[in-house]
Amino acid sequence: MARHDAIAEVTGLVWKLLVAIGDEVAEGAEVAILESMKMEVPVYAPVAGRVVEIVAPESAPVEEGATVVVIEAPS
Amino acid sequence: MSEGILDDVDRRRAAARAMGGRDKLDRRRAKGVLNARERIDALCDEGSFLEAGLHAHSVMEADKESTPGDGKLTGYATVEGRPAAVVSNDFTVKGASSSLTNMRRIAHVKRTATLRGMPLIFLGESSGARMPDNMGAAGMGTLLGNDPLQYVRHRETPWVSALLGDCFGSSAFYACLSDFVVMREGACMAIGSARLVQLAMGEVIEPEALGGAAFHARETGAIDQMVKTDEDAIALTKRFLSYLPSAAGTPPPRAETAGGPATDLAAMVPQKRTRGYGMRRVVTALADPESVLELKPQFARTVVTALARIDGHTVGVIANNPMFKAGALDADACSKATRFIATCDSFHIPIVNLVDTPGFVIGSDAEKRRAPTKIMTYMTALQSATVPKFSVIVRKAYGQAYLNMGGGKNSDEVAAWPTAEISFMEPRFGARVVSPPEADEATLAAAEEALARGSEVWEIAGMFAVQHVIKPDETRAWLIDMLRIYGSSTTAAMGKRHLAAWPFNF
């Protein structure tokens, strides 16, 4: 199993987490919504897999490129 | 003919191919960096490289023996089956510095490629002007300025630069004149080296910060893609060329197509105007499978510029990306779009605009960055481009930015999704402008609602300022129809290339 980071593409606040640990997600699924410059900006799952870690909970500030959620996938 | 003469030919060939010697070549190999001839082998079809100037060397008497090829290898080959000309810098010979002989070599293949219709590929790694050859009045008079066409280019054929090490002087300058630039991590592109900068300016700076790949990818936009290895750079070079014709007189090659992707586009784009989404996903969903090559993905991210194929036809996609600044076009985005339009117009590549922008970024920073003039340069480029131009309004299309994205008659054909909102500015701000200063919240809300209603697609389609209203999942088929209709005329979608002589950055 390999770990894959779902990253914030912009700096902002985590507005809504859409997944919990243990959830199965599809590739490209929205896992969180950031609030950044009055816009809601999604964080996408880079691969299909299972959510194994929430790095940035709701209301947490995140920098561009930071990991929000970690997804485990077979490869 | 005596055997001695023929043996001498073999001996001289072997000496030339030995480049700067085993030690230097081994040191490069240990670092995982290809040498100039290995790069040629990776680029060119097997056995196809024919060198022009194998026996060239420096004109300086003292350097004749130590400058095999004179540090810049040039010749002809086929790349993926198509003829091309190649310049591969050999850093093991005097740092591939520019000298009289190797400048002649470049000029020769450049002229041949231009006149005979072949792409030109620069495998860059050079230290700049050769010393002391260039020093003094005699050096300058002999080496510089004798070729008035050295840095003139009217995009007669595609040029690609791969930046694969220290790239100062010619490798940097030719990259700045190329249609596609790929840079390996660890390479440095600058006018002069960090060492020279420190000597001349007193500025202490690391090469990465002065001209590293990440710096150019994010800050200057001077490169189109950043990669980890020489091999990756060469693979991308080939990939880029596959979208373009070999010369400006012919249309781009049409690729085999395996049908369109099955993606639910409507689900990909949220209706709520303040909700971002990844426009790259939309581009991927519209294009033929695996056919999207994004250019400058880390620079001016509010706009996506990408080569792609639709039903096998090369298209140039310009798409606002609401992931960043809501898709608002800033000064860098204007530069990026302008340059891309010039490439498309020069090589008969139809332009597809995907529109979702709240307008241009405004404010004092935008003014400092000369946004107004960049907006107009971009507009002039779009209106001067004679390739087929299409626009699909996905969601927001406001103000002048609507025109820059092809709105009105600035594209040949405009389609809109039912989610399109077309107006001069966001209804929230528009309501403020049209209401008296003393207006209360209820009055403002009513004004905003009225303006939002007036922004719906049916109004603009009703007056024929938008020619088609299409559902998201009809977009690919619509584009295929457009390419057929605009490509079936007597012009065969060939443009007049008015932008071919435009510069390369704005």
Image (cartoon, helix red, strand yellow):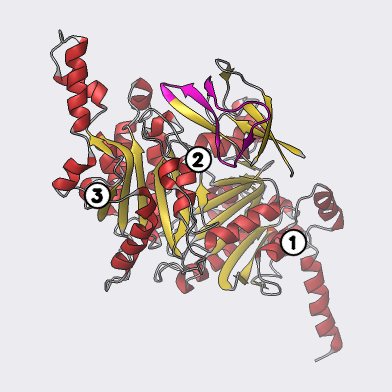
> Is residue B177 left or right of B226 when viewed as pictured?
left
Identified by mark 3, the residue type is Asn
In the image, which disc is placed on residue B38? 1
Q: Specify the segment rendered in magenta.
A: A15-39
At which x and y percent is residue B457? 23, 41
Q: In this view, does A58 lie to the left or right of B471?
A: right
Marks 2 and 1, how far apart in space? 28 Å
- List the residue tagged with mark 2: B221
Mark 2 belongs to which amino acid? Gly
User: CA–CA distance between discs 3 and 1?
Assistant: 47 Å
Q: Can residue B379 be seen in this view?
A: yes
Which sits earlier in the primary sequence, circle 2 or circle 1? Answer: 1
Local packing at callout 3 (Cα closer than 10 Å; few below 14, some 14-19, many 20+) is many
Mark 3 chain = B
Residue at the far bottom: name it.
Answer: B1
Magenta stretch: residue A21 in it?
Answer: yes
